[in-house]
Image: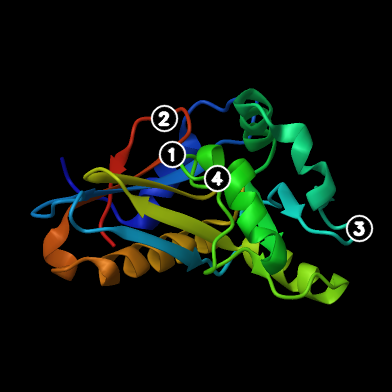
Amino acid sequence: MENLTLEKALDELKKQEKRKFEQSVDLIINLKKIDVKKTQINLFVNLPHKIKDKKICGFIESKTNLIDTIPKAAFAKYKDKKSIKNLTKQYDFFISSAPNMPSVATTFGRVLGPAGKMPSPKLGILMNDSEKDITDLVKKINTIVRVQVKEPSVKISIGKENMDNQKIIENIKTAYHALMNELPNKNDNIKSVMIKFTMTKPLRVNI
């Protein structure tokens, strides 16, 4: 099977049957000659183009119209695992003020940790929960994707089908190069690259 250019692959995918919802564009990077258990890769990639506004919840004390918030006094409502799991499903991303982090870890960590949604020092902890700091962090989160390598095939949601092809391609190249630069043997660890929409078969591409 020949590898397509990104432009050709996107054109092919856009010709396929339209769905009743806007499909996501997924980038699939298949790895080789790497033990993903020994090589821990967990990075945040800042994409040039926003995919969507993420649903964000903040474990912060200040009230804001920018995001939903849960102050420390309300943590007691989340004693059982089921209520935290429901919370995890409702939001794409969680942030916290620095002083609340120990309590967030104790109360929510057992569910948010495995789900990959724990507020992170890399992105998600506010030293100051002022309106300006929250605004800046929300802007940053909305253009970021998290890439965690847990198996030899890595899938990254990189765009929406109705986005302009050029913007999707720039997002794909940014995420691809960011991951490749984290691999011990760079390009030699990449077996193949594919792109697909939510409901389509993947197409092999050259980057």
Image mark for residue 63 = 3
The residue positioned 74% from the left and 73% from the top of the image is 136
The residue positioned 28% from the left and 69% from the top of the image is 182
- Would you call the spot at circle 3 few (<14 residues within 10 Å), some (14-19), or many (20 or more)? some
Q: Residue 109: name its quadrant.
A: top right
| N-term mark: 3 or 1 | 1
- Percent across and percent down for residue 82 are 63, 23
Q: Amino acid at mark 1?
A: Leu
| N-term mark: 2 or 1 | 1
Quick one: SS at disc 2? loop
Q: Residue 172: name its quadrant.
A: bottom left
Judging by the rendered image, the residue that carries numbered circle 4 is 109
Quick one: SS at disc 4? helix
Residue 105's place in the image compared with 127, above or below, is above
Judging by the rendered image, the residue that carries numbered circle 1 is 13
Residue nearer the viewer, 100 or 199: 100
Residue nearer the viewer, 74 or 36: 74
Residue nearer the viewer, 13 or 193: 193
Q: Amino acid at mark 4?
A: Gly
Quick one: SS at disc 1? helix
Judging by the rendered image, the residue that carries numbered circle 2 is 200
The answer to whether marks 2 and 1 mark residues whose Cβ atoms lie closer than 8 Å is yes
Q: CA distance from mark 3 to mark 4?
A: 23 Å
| N-term mark: 1 or 4 | 1
Q: Amino acid at mark 2?
A: Thr
Residue nearer the viewer, 3 or 115: 115
Name the mark nearer the viewer: 2 or 1.
2
Colour theme: rainbow
